[in-house]
């Protein structure tokens, strides 16, 4: 039996929520913010280590549902070694990916992040998936908290 894309997506989310990458506070961070999604109860803190304009290190901690954790885990892998400008562009792209219909063949450039597109059909879960990305923007702009409300 071959796995459908849907199965593969579920696997990515399960994997990243059970074994989150870059999980735990980053000792030497230059920026940080705490993100909250009151609807689901997700609380995700994001830590950034910026060297000039380059993101040398990124990690997250906190607790939340499988979607918010998987999104945060995938995000840390996606944004590492990006410049601030690239991060801002990427967050915009991901917000669009998570909220707008787009051609599925455009998914290739998003790698494992495409797994998160399953939330589009569930408006309440969209906030779980976008929370870590909102939180990164808050951290970059010197705010210490972000909320989906
Ligand atoms: Zn959630």
Image: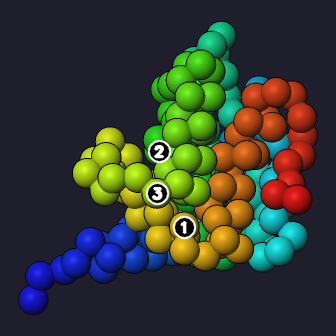
Residue drawn where x is 66% and y is 71% of the image: 123
From the image, state whether disc 2 or disc 3 is nearer to you: 3
Q: Give the structural element (helix, strand or loop) at label 2.
A: helix
In this view of the protein, which residue sits in the foreground, 27 or 104?
104
Residue drawn where x is 89% and y is 35% of the image: 143
Q: Earlier in the sequence, mark 3 or mark 1?
A: 3
Instruction: Report the disc number at residue 101.
Output: 3
Residue drawn where x is 85% and y is 48% of the image: 146
Q: Position of residue 139 (x, y in %)?
A: 79, 35
How many C-alpha atoms fall within 10 Å of the one at disc 3: few (<14), some, or many (≥20)? few
Q: Position of residue 90 (x, y in %)?
A: 53, 34
Count of numbered labels shown in the rendering: 3
In this view of the protein, which residue sits in the foreground, 125 or 20?
125
In this view of the protein, which residue sits in the foreground, 77 or 96?
96
Q: Measure the C-alpha gap from mark 3 to mark 1.
A: 8 Å
How many C-alpha atoms fall within 10 Å of the one at disc 1: few (<14), some, or many (≥20)? some
């Amino acid at each position: 039996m071959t796995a459908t894309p849907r199965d593969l997506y579920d696997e990515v989310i399960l994997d990243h929520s059970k074994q989150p990458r870059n999980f735990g506070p980053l000792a030497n961070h230059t920026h940080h913010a705490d993100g909250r999604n009151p609807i689901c109860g997700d609380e995700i803190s994001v830590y950034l280590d910026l060297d000039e304009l380059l993101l040398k290190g990124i990690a997250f901690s906190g607790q939340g549902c499988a979607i918010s954790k998987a999104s945060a885990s995938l995000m840390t892998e996606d944004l590492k070694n990006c410049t601030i400008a690239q991060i801002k562009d990427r967050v915009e792209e991901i917000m669009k990916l998570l909220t707008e219909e787009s051609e599925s063949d455009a998914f290739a450039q998003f790698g494992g992040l495409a797994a998160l597109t399953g939330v589009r059909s569930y408006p309440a879960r969209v906030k779980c998936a976008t929370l870590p990305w909102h939180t990164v923007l808050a951290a970059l702009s010197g705010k210490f908290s972000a909320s989906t409300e």
